[in-house]
Amino acid sequence: MKKIYLLLLTLSMSLYAAAQQFEIKGKITDGDGQPISFVSVFIKGTTKGVSANVDGAYSIKVDRGLVTLSFTVVGFKSTTQSVDVFGDVTLNKTLEPEHYTLNSVTIKGNGEDPAYKIVRNAIKNRKAYLEEIFAYHSDVYIKGMQKLVGAPKKFFGRDIQKTLNLDTNRNGILYLSESQSKFSYMKPNKIKEEMISSKISGRNNAFSFNKASDMRINFYENLLLANTGLSARSFVSPIADNALFYYNYKLLGKTEENGLTINKIAVTPRRKNDPAFRGVIYIADNIWRLMGTDLNLTKEAGINLIDTLNIAQQFIKIDKYYMPGNLKFQFNGNVFGFKFEGYFISFYSNYNINPKFEKGYFTPEILKITKAVNKKDSAYWANNRPIPLTSEERRDYIKKDSIALRMQSKPYLDSIEKANNNFTLGKILITSYSHNDRYNKRSYNFDPIIRAVFYNTVEGFAIKYGATYRKRYENNEFLTIRPEARYGFKNKIFTANISTYYYYDAVKRAGIGLGFGNEISDLNNYGTMDLLANSVNSLLFERNFPKFYKRNFASITTQRELTTGLQASLSLDYTTNYALTNSTLYKFRDFQDRAFTSNNPLNPTNDSPFFPNYKSISATANLTYTIGQKYITRPDAKIYTESKYPRLNLRYKKGIEGLLGGETDYDLITFEAYQERIGLGLFGYTSFVIGAGKFLNNEKLFYPEFKHFRGNNAMFFPPNLRKFRFLDFYQYSTNEHYFEAHVEHNFSGFILNKVPLLRKLKLEEIIGINYLSQPQKKNYTEYYFGIQRLIFGISYGFAYDNGRKVNHGFRFAYGF
């Protein structure tokens, strides 16, 4: 019996030893002892591997026995090393620079550089390589790090070192995150990702926003990085079909690697400000594949916010294919004296080429994040992290995770809030005063006085003041309550109301809102001009564009997602409405050729009330559907991503006569289709809105219930795709039917980028058309063209009414 026991013990120990994994770690350097960053280290014959970090350190788990590791990085000779593993091993590796020679290349006088022939062959094969993979599955690890390397001492009065928790030189890591995912892809563009683990420095309960789909870039595509925020336009790949129009090429040399001749080719833009990369690409002879990239985008190419972006990509061979091994985005910049740098790197392993996905595997859910994702402890990360932390990153985790624990305590939060909640005259007058209580997850915000005081001809000088209370709960639920009061010193009308909104289900995007009280409202329910702008126009230029009325109201509204991409809302409104008239004609400056108009938008010279006091009960049902909607599921929210297809809106509003004394009887149905930023590659992007509607019944309604439009009578206005530039705010509101369309194209610098002095301003050219047809304006059309940059724009336009020019001039846009 004892022998049997010993035999079983020996057998179990042998099996344990055989199954046990050991660590091979080390540092990868060049011949001078300098570390080589982000070297791919794979177990030969497999797709299991890791990557060195920025300091050249690597660590890989292997089974006991003979293991052969391959070391690969662009610019150095690939090499292998066999190790007989009986325990943990330290294996440092020195890589030799790859020597690219031009011994066999002769370029005669005015002859073409040999690189052009190589690139042409790569272009011929571009589409075949783009489409060769029908589907794949892989593990993806993504790491992001951003840090400040210089900053001003203070910004808007705040000590930057204390605010951002930096060292005495105002340097330090701002953001450090890691995530691991299972990523699946199938043609033409189906993706599915499940995040396995997530970690963010200093935020123990947070989920990383790293997505494998965000890190995908394929230089076999003609245009790259569209709609990423880097630029308003796309960038041309060095092997795009039309790449020779944008690039110069130079063969730097050739080398032999694994039986292939690899060509190292320098690429530079033909014109300094072309949307093109500069750097190096590696192309294999005969098969004409990309074997690696080391490319840069600079300010000259038109990127925003950052100065330089480097994209380095390495490939690994899987069967007969070459798939991304790792991809690095490295960047730096300087904004308002804040100098920053950082990188995002994705590392791919455990590839499965052309897997068989079951029917229904791909859904609109492109990323799933479960509650367990951020629960992995430090032991898990130590054993599963494919890119080791640097010493700086380890210190950052320790420091910020420790601070994060302290920050959850009430004494710590109270000490922070005591400093941040200090009351100053500047806050209450100009910027708004906020009082935060982070421990109880609530805040109070008080409007600034400067925005509360205004003037119009109905109320005279007046004040409108409010405060907002916000309470946050678990799972992204929140409650807001806002009381507001308004008083006109000339007409002596006081109004007050309170509104509240409870967002109770972030996954279903569901909420309910309540409001009651009274208020002074614009007769155009879309609004016409903000109170400050109208004050300036009225007092300085004798122009009183907005028209007002008073309403007592009570309302309830609810919204909820019915299914992916389909959002529904219902509302019930009770109002008592009162017409108002001008109470003053005061102005700072009197223009001889101008006069204030009445508060009757349909009769500028008659200031008597143009509708009787009346009660209205209305119900509104609204459906919004986004075609092809994709989304991300988090434990505390459902996040929609931007769709490539239009959004459709159907709305029905009913005036209910007799209910609670309601005096209106009408039925309005409207439909709208819209989409913004439809990418057109190098030619910028287009946005459009098309809408139509009809009163199925208009037996009894008054002007406030008409269908209104977003008109404009002012030279300065906040931009809106649905906004006309010359249409009167009120005259063409209708109680019958209408059709409107708005189309705008932004060339994103395609034209002005070719003008030497103007290209530095990064101006964007726009052209647009606005159209309206309704019973009183059957063919009203506006054409405009102009330029814009960030939140400012200037345009010149023409307005035609049934073919007859009725207006023209400049318009200045401002605001987000």
Image: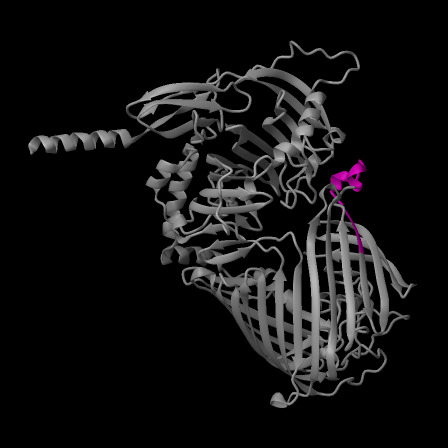
Is residue 11 shown left or right of residue 684?
left
Does residue 501 appear anywhere in the picture?
no
Quarter of the figure with the C terminus: bottom right
Q: Is residue 767 magenta?
A: yes
Q: Find residue 713 and report its image quarter.
A: bottom right
Q: What stretch of residues is rendered in magenta?
A: 751-768
Q: Looking at this view, is 203 or 58 the one in front?
A: 58
- Expressed as whole percent of the image width and height from the top left, the position of residue 191 reads 54, 46
Q: Is residue 25 left or right of residue 246?
A: left
Residue 613 higher or lower than 558, as above or below: below
Q: Answer whether residue 816 is visible to the viewer in this image.
A: yes
Q: Which residue is the extreme one toward the right?
A: 804
Answer above or below: position of 278 versus 714.
above
- Which residue appears at 80% of the width and 85% of the height? 608
Q: Position of residue 561 (x, y in %)?
A: 54, 65
- Name the quarter where the N terminus is drawn: top left
| Residue 212 pos. (x, y %) | 52, 42
